[in-house]
Image (cartoon, rainbow, N blue to C red):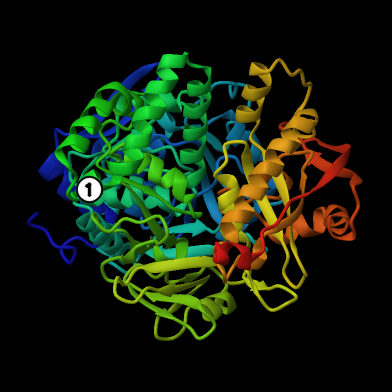
Amino acid sequence: MGNTSSDLVTMPQLLVRNVARYGDKAAYREKEFGIWQSWTWAEASDEIHQIARGFVALGLKEGDSVAIIGRNRPVLYWSMIAAQMCGATPVPLYQDAVAEEMAYVLDHCGARIVIAADQEQVDKTIEVQETVKGIEQVVYVDGRGLRKYDHSTMHSMDDLKAMGKPEHQAELDARASRQNGDTTCVILYTSGTTGRPKGVVLSNSNIIETSKNSSDFDHLRADDDVLAYLPMGWVGDFIFSIGQAMWTGFCVNCPESGDTLHTDLREIGPTYYFAPPRVFETQLTNVMIRMEDSGRFKKWLFDHYMAHAKKVGPAILDGESVSPGDRLKYRLGNLFVYGPLKNTLGFSRVRVGYTAGEAIGPEIFDFYRSLGINLKQLYGQTEASVYITQQPDGEVRGDTVGVPSPGVELKIADSGEVFYRSPGVFQEYFKNADSTASTKDPEGWVATGDAGFIEEGSGHLRIIDRAKDVGKMADGSLFAPKYVENKLKFFPNILEAVVFGNGRDRCTAFLNIDLTAVGNWAERNNIAYSSYQELAGHPQVMDTLQAHVEEVNASVAEDPMLAGCQVHRFVVLHKQLDADDGELTRTQKVRRKIIEEKFEDLITALYDGSGSVFTETEVTYEDGRKGKISATLEIRDAAVVAPMAVAAE
């Protein structure tokens, strides 16, 4: 490539390199009003410089924070690089965060300027300004609905760019010359499964070294395409859409909206793709629903060739020896089933695919790999600039998260907790020295909060569960809820599962149905329902979920270490767990403590033998209003399997 990371220690330097090397190549695409628009690296650089000069004109100083709120758009990525050019720190926020959540982050990072994508984000910013006094200017991208607003401290993005003058360039150049690898690149706020989110300070070196190492690991190149659709406040999006994009020069493609995401994914056909397990689960659910609705021959064709793909697909993908007959049959399957299916999913061109954030069900993982999609798992954290482990090609398995990423060292504490040290390790938690000291020791080792072990021989890391969630049952056997929850969530009918049992004599569970999958089943069987609650409590739905729980129990019983985690009783919740109600984080992780407190009455009923329980729960509607829903929920017993019975077979 010519340049080493030591020559390129800041984002503005990478931008200069990309203009020189890839000037005429597409750097960003965005779909707007149904049409894809494209910007080359040279054009993107021009836009970024205009925004940066505008920031200087607006009074942005070195060390200031610029908050960025909205869906994935090139102009918002450019605003981040422009802020870095000014020596300021970009702080991307979750666009679906309510005003109250935003207020904490905006106040904590001391944002002086807010870049808001549209009226919704402007409204939330104005609402928080009642308590957050540091915000001086708001810059909006989409001006629809904002004509009658007070514009004394509000500017359109076009106005901001027009403020910048050629004479501001000298100031920008001077600031750029003062930056180095230790300069803060971004502050990203953790999802906060416990307590307030923490501001993770990542330096230029953290992001650039990690982007270089991870790109080299998977041979990412300038002609790759990535779809930028994940929350901009999340570290993964920052690494893929800023870090790796700037390092490799590949093209960042922004969909029009969440509603058009699937169509846009098909049109772009990314070569490098990341999705959390829930996205892969949802796509598989939709495939299975469509197959249930298809004709008899089509369904037979799908089942026949998918059974063959499951048998030989992963081996072909990994370059292992497969008989000529099996290869021929797989090629036919690709012609009739796998190829059209990959095209429908938008995965025809995927060369490197990743999932992380939660463990993915092995059956879901195997399904995609059997189609010939190079889906792999990585393990990471915001504090690591994402990458801790990755799966090398040819060593991909559903039960591990891979080997240490280049430059990463791993060790396992006596307690079983995983520790790592790497060039990507964060500088500090912003304004939180105590938390920094308790997470990162003086030698740079970081506690992950996850329990796991390194396999002898392969060197692969296996994660068991969150360290704080791993406990002991009353009889001393291991309690690892995530292990069971992931098995339950493999079923298309189950969207979410929360398992309880720490310190108790048996495990119980809350379940959420997947409204798409179960609603489709109800439609096919002419079962009428008026609400999520009514469908979730339908006797046939309860019977189906009971069968799923009992199937998982049989599977869990096969592992002597975890056989005590079988689910004895379960209840199907009357509402979906929701980030707006505080039950999930913005990255869809379960907040166990809040759920345990909020639904204490249901947990009590699960353990006291009740056959049903009446409950009332506060909910938040889409417009922010609060309300209450009540229901009488049936509690079901599930058959469990004696571990010895399995072993004796």
Helix, strand or loop at label 1? It is: helix
Q: Quadrant of the C terminus?
A: bottom right
Which residue is under mark 1?
Answer: 15
Residue with the most extreme front position: 649
> What residue is shown at x 55% (from left), y 49% (from top)?
587
Vertical comparison of 194 with 636: above or below: below
Residue with the most extreme left position: 2
Q: Visible in this render: residue 1?
A: yes
Q: Visible in this render: residue 51?
A: no
Left or right relative to 340: residue 119: right
Left or right relative to 514: residue 371: left
Left or right relative to 159: residue 492: right
Vertical comparison of 433 with 394: above or below: below
Q: Position of residue 144 (x, y in %)?
A: 55, 21
> What residue is shown at x 41% (from left), y 39% (from top)?
76
> What residue is shown at x 77% (from left), y 69% (from top)?
505
> What residue is shown at x 28% (from left), y 30% (from top)?
348
Vertical comparison of 278 with 378: above or below: above
> On the image, which quarter does residue 592 sit in?
bottom right
- Mark 1 neighbour density, 10 Å: few (under 14) some (14–19) many (20 or more): many
Q: Position of residue 79 (x, y in %)?
A: 39, 43
Type of amino acid at the residue the image marks with label 1: Leu
Q: Nearer the viewer, residue 99 or 452?
A: 452
